[in-house]
Image (cartoon, rainbow, N blue to C red):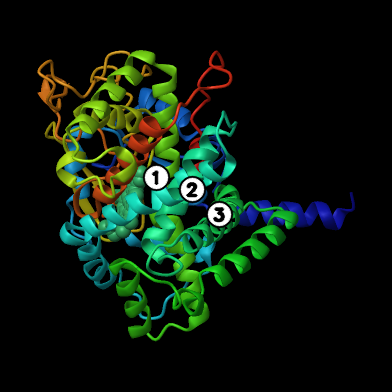
Amino acid sequence: MSWAVVLGLLAALLLLLLLTRRRTRRPGEPPLDLGSIPWLGHALEFGKDAAGFLTRMKEKHGDIFTVLVGGRHITVLLDPHSYDAVVWEPRSRLDFHAYAVFLMERIFDVQLPHYNPGDEKSKMKPTLLHKELQALTDAMYTNLRTVLLGDTMEAGSGWHEMGLLEFSYSFLLRAGYLTQYGVEAPPHTQESQAQDRIHSADVFHTFRQLDLLLPKLARGSLSAGDKDQAGKVKGRLWKLLSPARLATRAHRSKWLESYLLHLEEMGVSEELQARALVLQLWATQGNMGPAAFWLLLFLLKNPEALAAVRGELETVLLGAEQPISQMTTLPQKVLDSMPVLDSVLSESLRLTAAPFITREVVADLALPMADGREFSLRRGDRLLLFPFLSPQKDPEIYTDPEIFKYNRFLNPDGSEKKDFYKDGKRLKNYSLPWGAGHNQCLGKGYAINSIKQFVFLVLMQFDLELTTPDVDIPEFDLSRK
Ligand code: HEM
């Protein structure tokens, strides 16, 4: 190595050390852990196994601490009794959208002019609730039947073999896409439904190629080959979801109509609209399939749970006015009377839903903890809640927290169990797969209805078996988060 290179490296190292003047903990702030690598801090451990790293930090520092991760100071809060203070804090102090906007640009190349998340949210919210929720639920049932029953009928009778994740993800995403982005032509004819199946399968397979690259895209760690692939797949999706193509679709949801209008009002070009529509496909359809996969897997691994759910769904069928082959909807009243399936869904989300609930600290503020302590947070830092560790995997709240218990969220009388305790105090936030507070998931009702309809159709219309029933349940993939 030449002297020039050695000197260059030394200069770069010196610059790095100067740039990363070590922060010190001020009175009133949470414990500070900067790790041993300047600027990077704990980035490597955090990126490799966030749950394991945060568990170790919790053992070392308690339920609130600040860590350095890739140049950012992140305060991690793991006391579920104190989560409300964060999720209900006004946006002017703790902001949800800054990080979402960053991901939007980095992953989906979407930079909207005059973007106002509050305005967008107030326009989109009514399209996912109340009357519109019923319309979405009904359309979803029709579209689930189109793709699920149509595909299997085309494949002929007898057993078919397919990966369970592919099965759950593809059918839910395809039906969800048809529900929100519209179908081929009204009325539903056999030809138009066959077209819907082909087109939605194309959308799913293209989307899935991008989906598999998302963790690397979010971290900015794509190889040259990956970048090439991501560029091609995005280009194809932008074409599939271009406003011109969508203009020809029928039964488009209120959600799509409002979103397109909102983009037009902002003066967004057609090209950028297509990008935003791909982003929305991921935001609205990216979680339902994986959630349904875990639910079905836990059921297939737990015969007692499967029998209990089947029993409940058969009772629903007995009470229905028509046989299942003629049922065109599953009304909300019926969907709301499935406590065993509700408990199974809550339990599988408890074990697998691991969103990082992240907020930017917009102003210096004092964070009150439920036990009376108070901590100062600095403007410019990030605040992170990780409910997956606590409450969801906390042994004080859930006995044998790693084990799937289908009736964990059921009382002995069959009603929903809502009382869970930590430190002798009842918890308000005992599981947070949908987030909580101001930014709780807007699609929660639609997602729950869709997953339940999917499970209903799968269990009542098919025989489902694992080809290798003795293989262990796979590790949960936290890199998707
Ligand atoms: C199993 C499926 C789903 C899960 C587990 C899920 C989870 C979440 C979580 C955890 C958040 C809150 C993030 C935070 O507070 O930091 C969130 C927000 C959101 N979700 Fe979902 N979601 C699902 C499906 C859907 C669907 C189907 C839609 C729409 C059709 C949707 C629309 C939204 C929107 C718009 C927000 C942002 C709310 C805001 O801006 O305040 N989600 N979701």
Mark 2 and mark 1 in contact? Answer it, CB < 8 Å: no
Mark 2 and mark 3 in contact? Answer it, CB < 8 Å: no
Q: Please indicate, yes or no, whether residue 481 appears anywhere in the rendered image.
A: no
Task: Find disc 2 in the rendering and name its residue.
Answer: 150
Whole-percent x, y for residue 112 in the image: 42, 76
Task: Find disc 3 in the rendering and name its residue.
Answer: 201
| Marker count (numbered) | 3
The tag earlier along the polypeptide, 2 or 1, is: 2
Whole-percent x, y for residue 404 in the image: 35, 19
For the residues labelled 2 and 3, the Cα–Cα distance comes to: 12 Å
Q: 37 above or below 316? A: below
Q: 448 above or below 104? A: above
Amino acid identity at mark 2: Gly
Task: Find disc 1 in the rendering and name its residue.
Answer: 288
| Residue in the image at 27% along x and 54% along y | 138
Q: 142 above or below 232? A: above
Side of 133 where 163 appears, left or right: right
Amino acid identity at mark 1: Met
> Of tags 2 and 3, which is closer to the observer?
2
* Mark 1 residue CB less than 8 A from any atom of ligand 1: yes
Side of 20 where 145 appears, left or right: left
Amino acid identity at mark 3: Ala
